[in-house]
Amino acid sequence: MQVFDTVHGWRRATSAPLYRWREESSVVTKVSAAFVLALLMALAAQVRLVLPFTPVPFTGQVLVVLLGALVLGRYGALGQGMYLAMGGAFGWFSGMAGFAALLGPTGGYLLGFVVASMVIGEMVERRKDWDMGRVLAAMSLGVLIIYSLGAAQLVLFIGLDLTEAMVLGVIPFVTVDALKVLMAAGAGSMFLRPA
């Protein structure tokens, strides 16, 4: 019990300044942080593992999306929008160049990054008390949004049926993304007001 009290006390001690940072920072600071988030997304897109049976690579981007939304709130979605704009202009998307990537097999996931950030960021801004269960639920919802838009893109633009889209674009990623949810929830919860 003492270990729990120590960890819980540490979390409370470290959480207060971090969530206040988001609440008290200027717009310029938050926009600058969103730009840094876009650059981190670009870096995460370059580190990828391509599997021969799926057109969707493994990257660290989902973790960056989740952490960005937790840390920046609504500005996480701005960072994802900046990433899409700069990725289209500079061609740094994972495996594809330019705005054509939005119509390719990973386009739905790219759009899912923005939508997931918007939803999680809105939740972070509105809810003022968080426990680990709520953080895990928010992160899981974000991943579900990314998967949904990614699979929809595979069905609508690539021509896969729903089963193929799930087998190629969702199922291979569930275990790794579950670990990313746990990592983001653990690290990102320091930026949320404790319950």
Image (cartoon, rainbow, N blue to C red):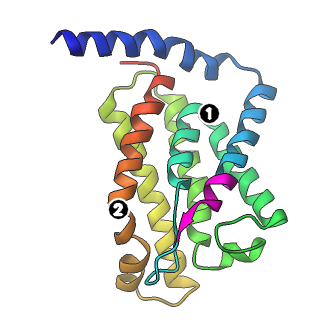
The span picked out in magenta is 42-49
Image-based side of 115 in relation to 96, left or right: left
* Residue placed furthest toward the right: 89
Q: Quadrant of residue 35?
A: top right
Q: Is residue 75 above or below residue 131?
A: below
Asked whether 153 falls inside the magenta stretch, the response is: no
Q: Which structural element holds mark 1?
A: helix
What amino acid is at disc 2? Val
Q: Residue at x 56, y 64 (%)?
A: 48
Q: Are marks 1 and 2 in contact (CB under 8 Å)?
A: no
Query: Would you say residue 43 sits in the magenta stretch?
Result: yes
List x then y, in percent, for residue 97. Answer: 75, 73
Q: For mark 2, what is the residue? A: 174
Name the secondary structure under disc 2: helix
| Residue 72 numbered mark, or none | 1
Residue 177, percent from left and from top? 40, 55
